[in-house]
Amino acid sequence: MSMDPETAEPYVLLDGEGETALWYSARVTMKASTPHLGVSVCDIEAGDEPPLHAHTREHEWFYVIAGEVSFQFPTGDVRAPAGSFVSVPPEVPHTLSIESDTSRLLVLNAPGGEERMFQLSPADAEDMARMFAEYGLRLLGPHPRDAA
């Protein structure tokens, strides 16, 4: 599902539909992928969160559909229960922690393209670091849970 903005036609993807990839055990389902915008739904369990990182190009937005998440920023942690919206500008170091057993997140990135990284399904932390670099994400350190 690669939507060409020049010849785009309307489409509908129902819950669970779209290109799906596993990033470790998190399930990422792409809903839109254009040069301007990437949209994914991420079903993620506690313990499978990303390391501390920053996007060099993308502004990233999260809408917490289900569960409870906390976001870690240089200015402190912010709790985000279901219904919360979180905006992360480019170059802001961040990660998130799943506070419930599982969570479902709507993730938007602009410009688009970074959502395609999830299709690469890393084999280990070194592989993930290479993929981050390829897609313009700066790996800044381990997840706070792993740093303790």
Image (cartoon, helix red, strand yellow):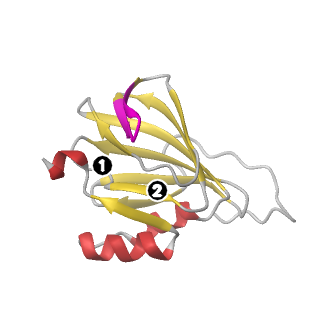
Question: Which stretch is magenta?
Answer: 69-79
**Mark 2 closeness class: few <14, some 14–19, many ≥20 residues within 10 Å:** many
Q: Label for residue 5?
A: none
Residue in the picture at 30% in, 39% down: 97
Neighbour tally class for label 1: few under 14, some 14-19, many 20 plus, Cα within 10 Å: some
Q: Nearer the viewer, mark 2 or mark 1?
A: 2
Q: Main secondary structure of the magenta part?
A: strand
- Residue 142 screen position, x and y as percent: 25, 57
Q: Is residue 32 above or below residue 83?
A: below
Q: Does 21 sit above or below residue 71?
A: below
Q: Are marks 2 and 1 in contact (CB under 8 Å)?
A: no
Q: Which quarter of the rendered picture does the N terminus lie within?
A: bottom right
Q: Amino acid at mark 1?
A: Glu
Q: Position of residue 60 (x, y in %)?
A: 56, 47
Instruction: Give the SS element for disc 2.
Output: strand
The amino acid type, in three-letter code, at marker 2 is Ala
Residue at 82 percent of width and 59 percent of height: 8
Please check the rendered image and state whether residue 75 is part of the magenta-colored stretch, yes or no.
yes
- Could you say whether the residue bearing mark 1 is in a helix, strand or loop? loop
Residue 33 relative to residue 60: left or right: right
Check disc 2 and report the residue beneath it. 54
